[in-house]
């Protein structure tokens, strides 16, 4: 199950506050609902997004919360369709469509982590976006065998801001890479380093999403460094396709549990939980 339901009470939590099930016709419903009438209760749907079914289940839980006149919070650490943020003629804008569905739940707060595109804020109301930096710091601190990185690498232009923020927090320098793109076709021919990278030292590549891992494998090759000198931080580990091959290029691969793909066997070497981080950033009611 990728959607979890809880009720926050003063000094206590009720986990498993509902159980989703599906009728033979395909419709989702909830059973075994927690019988909570406390006016201080906060109802929370924690969605580790795999499909739109997860959001439908969360919407059902929101309906229960609203019926009981209780605050409803949506934990959605991986914000879906943030990569589909640019209008193109005849094509849907995914971030707008998913945001409309989420907004229809009327949540008092939506908590996401490290959104791929800032445009999501234009569409998604009540969004609190949390920085991944505290998670990076915690993951490195808890990593067995970790003895420090000398610099951070941004794999492309889109990752520069988050990589720079991470480098500042770690007190190290940042180096930039970029995709070698054919301007006529838009096809990516490869990855190249923009900044000259010293051959000594250990480097942490920082980005928000790893899908099939091709960008990061290409980057590792572009550095010319062995895997012993490279680590990879990914906030949202989807880890599809050939992603397990990343282990051939990176000694350490860190991610969170924001997406169900994080625990695919043979990909990440360390997983950082995010539930407590989100709980600590709930608004007060």
Image (cartoon, rainbow, N blue to C red):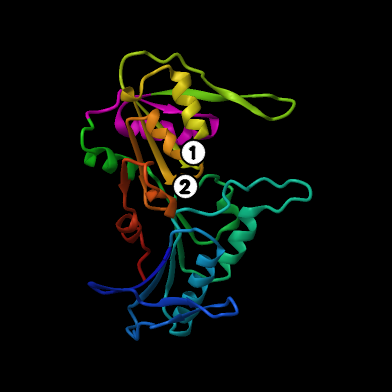
Residue that appears at 44% across and 82% down: 69
Q: Residue at x 50, y 66 (%)?
A: 54
Residue 268 rendering spot, x and y as whole percentages? 36, 42
Judge whether 284 appears above or below 236 on screen.
Answer: below
> Was residue 148 drawn as part of the magenta stretch in this picture?
yes
| Residue at 74%, 50% in the rendered image | 91
| Number of numbered callouts drawn | 2
Residue bearing the label numbered 1: 242
The C terminus lies in which quarter of the figure? bottom left
Query: From this viewpoint, is residue 100 visible?
Result: yes
Between label 1 and label 2, give the one nearer the viewer: 1
Read off the magenta span: 147-173
How far apart in space, not on screen, are marks 1 and 2 (Cα)? 11 Å
Confirm whether the magenta stretch covers residue 160. Answer: yes
Residue located 32% across and 78% down the image? 40
* Disc 2 packing (10 Å; few <14; some 14–19; many ≥20): many
As helix, strand or loop, the secondary structure at mark 2 comes to loop
The picture places residue 114, in percent across and down from the top left corner, at: 45, 46
Considering the numbered disc 1 on the image, is that residue within a helix, a strand or a loop? loop
Q: Is residue 43 above or below residue 115?
A: below
In the rendered image, which residue does mark 2 sit on? 238
């Amino acid at each position: 199950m990728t959607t979890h339901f809880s009720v926050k009470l003063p000094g206590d939590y009720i986990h498993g506050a509902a159980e989703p099930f599906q009728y033979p016709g395909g419709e989702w419903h909830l059973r075994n609902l927690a019988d909570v009438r406390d006016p201080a209760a906060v109802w929370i749907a924690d969605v580790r997004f795999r499909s739109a079914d997860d959001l439908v289940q969360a919407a059902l839980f929101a309906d229960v919360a609203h019926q009981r006149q209780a605050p409803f919070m949506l934990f959605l650490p991986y914000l879906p369709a943030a990569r589909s943020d640019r209008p193109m003629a005849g094509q849907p804008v995914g971030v707008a469509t998913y945001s409309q569905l989420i907004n229809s739940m009327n949540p008092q707060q939506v908590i996401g982590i490290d959104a791929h595109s800032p445009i999501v804020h234009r569409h998604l109301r009540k969004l609190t976006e949390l920085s991944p930096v505290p998670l990076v710091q915690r993951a490195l601190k808890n990593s067995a065998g970790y003895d420090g990185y000398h610099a951070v690498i941004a794999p492309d232009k889109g990752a520069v801001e988050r990589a720079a923020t991470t480098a500042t927090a770690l007190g190290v320098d940042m180096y930039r890479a970029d995709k070698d793109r054919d301007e006529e076709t838009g096809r990516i021919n490869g990855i190249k380093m923009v900044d000259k990278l010293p051959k000594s030292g250990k480097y942490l590549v920082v980005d928000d999403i790893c899908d099939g891992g091709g960008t990061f494998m290409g980057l590792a090759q572009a550095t010319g460094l062995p895997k012993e000198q490279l680590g990879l931080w990914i906030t949202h580990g989807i880890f599809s396709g050939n992603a397990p091959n990343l282990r051939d290029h990176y000694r350490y691969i860190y991610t969170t549990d924001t997406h169900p793909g994080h625990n695919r066997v043979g990909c990440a070497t360390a997983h950082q939980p995010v539930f407590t981080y989100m709980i600590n950033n709930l608004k007060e009611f």
